[in-house]
Amino acid sequence: MEPIPLPSHIHYELLLQLLERQTTPVAQHQLQHQAQVHELISTLRKALTQQKRLEESLSRANVPIDYRWSLNGMGIEAISSDPC
């Protein structure tokens, strides 16, 4: 069975840390932007939660997952098994 490509969790973590540590403090002075930043953070958290649910479902169905770090088509398994 062909693995299902999914984004690596680190992508969500990087975006969340950037938004929480750098964007939020700057946007605090502008209420409209602050609300949008908080909504974006919430949406990213929901997306990560949904992905984790999908991963659990795939795991129960014995469907392999290929975590992707980029769009280059090489998942972590391919990178770690590359002899170069």
Image: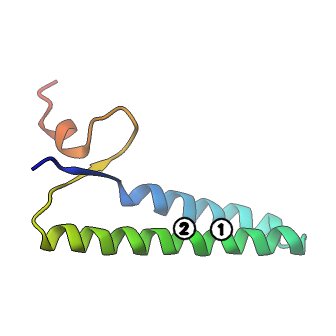
Position of residue 18 relative to residue 34, above or below, is above
Say above or below: 60 vs 14.
below
Q: Which residue is mark 1?
A: 40
Q: Secondary structure at mark 1?
A: helix
Which residue bears the numbered disc 2?
44
Q: Residue at x 27, y 36 (%)?
A: 74
Say whether residue 6 is left or right of residue 30: left
Q: Are marks 2 and 1 in contact (CB under 8 Å)?
A: yes
Coordinates of residue 8 in the picture (x, y in percent): 35, 55
Left or right of 21, for residue 45: left
Q: Is residue 63 left or right of residue 26?
A: left
- Label 2: few (<14), some (14–19) or many (≥20) C-alpha neighbours in 10 Å: some
| Residue at 12% across, 37% down | 81
Rounded to the nearest angstrom, the CA distance separating label 2 from label 1 is: 6 Å
Question: Which residue is painted at 82% across and 67% down in the image?
Answer: 27
Q: Position of residue 42 (x, y in %)?
A: 60, 75
